[in-house]
Amino acid sequence: MKKHIGVAMGGYTSEHDISIKSGENVIKLLSKASFEISKIIVTKENWIVEYKDEKIKLDLDSFTFLYKKKRIEFDVIFNSIHGSPGENGELQLKLKKLNIPFTGVNQEVAKMTYDKFKTLSYLKKFGITASKNILIKRNQSYDLKKIVKFVGLPCFVKANKSGSSYGVEKINFFSEMKKSVENCFKYDDELIIEEYIDGREISVGMIDYKNETLVLPPTEIVTKKEFFDYDAKYNGLSEEITPARINDFKKKQLDKICLKIHQLLRMKGLCRADFIYKNEKAYFLEINSIPGLTEESILPKQIMTAGIKIEDIIHDMVISL
């Protein structure tokens, strides 16, 4: 019998629509000759399985569903949910309790890496360089003047647990701070206020493929906006140059840093780390445990540049479970 693969997509956050695109692309890449494949569309209201042209509610207690009075199970879940509940450990914990194999990191790693500030703080202990940053919380007092004195201007205000550049604003003047903080608190109860580093933005994908961790060719991001925001990512307002225009020394330096981060965080499957490069130094920004897999996404382009077929990686991820 063919393995039944459930491709989970959507989620509870502002990244829902991007996640749907990623999941649909995964389904295109999975061989229908090798697997039985079902979509699992996740919203706060319902988890719906699209199976044999029917839409059926998923029983979350057992992660099964009824089709013509027969209970259908999944052999593997391909997790392509950006944000909650797929990237913060909720889905992983549920599947672990039910002994259902899933792609990507486990629940502990997911919970850690979804929290940008915790990840930065943890990696700092091991010599991973990052910009100056400070965490503020909605229900705690904070002094914006003291914060700006510490991180400087310009600076970034970022939702601590968000992706696709939702809840991120660049601040050039102190007069913009209060409004920006209010805007970003719409996306999360915790915000990172971070030093702006005027350098080259580099994104580096990593994959586990055929029992080996590979660092992919890096991508240099040149945006037409003030920074690599949602429009720049998804509406063609940036140039993504793969491989990045960096020399061999910098490439080897980044490879070494990425492998160290991968090992320290116990990453698995597919991931992507973002950096700012300035004065021969790479400043780590964040890591994404479920990077975008849309046709516009960075990681698939890096995989292609490496001379690997992305469908082979997707296939390898599924059969290895």
Image: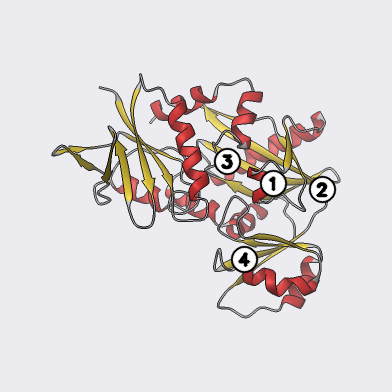
User: Which of disc 1 and disc 3 is earlier in sequence?
Assistant: 1
- Please state the horizontal and vertical placement of residue 287, each as a whole percent of the image: 60, 47
Direction from residue 97 to residue 301 in the image, left or right: right
- The answer to whether residue 1 is left or right of residue 11 is left
Return the residue at label 2. 199
Q: Which callout, 1 or 4, points at the residue further toward the start of the chain?
A: 4
| Mark 1, residue position | 232
Separation of residues labelled 3 and 4 (CA atoms): 31 Å
Quadrant containing the N terminus is top left
The three-letter code of the residue at mark 4 reads Cys
Packing grade of label 2 (10 A; few <14, some 14-19, many >=20) is: some
Cα distance between the residues tagged 1 and 4: 18 Å
Q: Secondary structure at mark 4?
A: helix
Q: Which residue is mark 4?
A: 184
Q: Which image quarter holds the C terminus? A: top left
Residue at (55, 21) in percent of width and height: 309
What residue is at 75 percent from the left and 71 percent from the top? 176
Query: SS class of the residue under badge 3?
Result: helix
Measured Cα–Cα span from mark 2 to mark 4: 24 Å
**Mark 3 = which residue?**
263
Q: Earlier in the sequence, mark 2 or mark 3?
A: 2
Which amino acid type is marked by label 1? Answer: Ala
Question: As shown in the figure, which amino acid type bears the numbered disc 3?
Answer: Gln
The one of 312 and 15 positioned closer to us in this rendering: 15
- As helix, strand or loop, the secondary structure at mark 2 comes to loop
**Front disc: 1 or 4:** 1
Identity, as a three-letter code, of the amino acid under mark 2: Gly
Q: Is residue 35 above or below residue 221?
A: above
Which of the two marks, 1 or 2, is nearer to us in this view?
Answer: 1
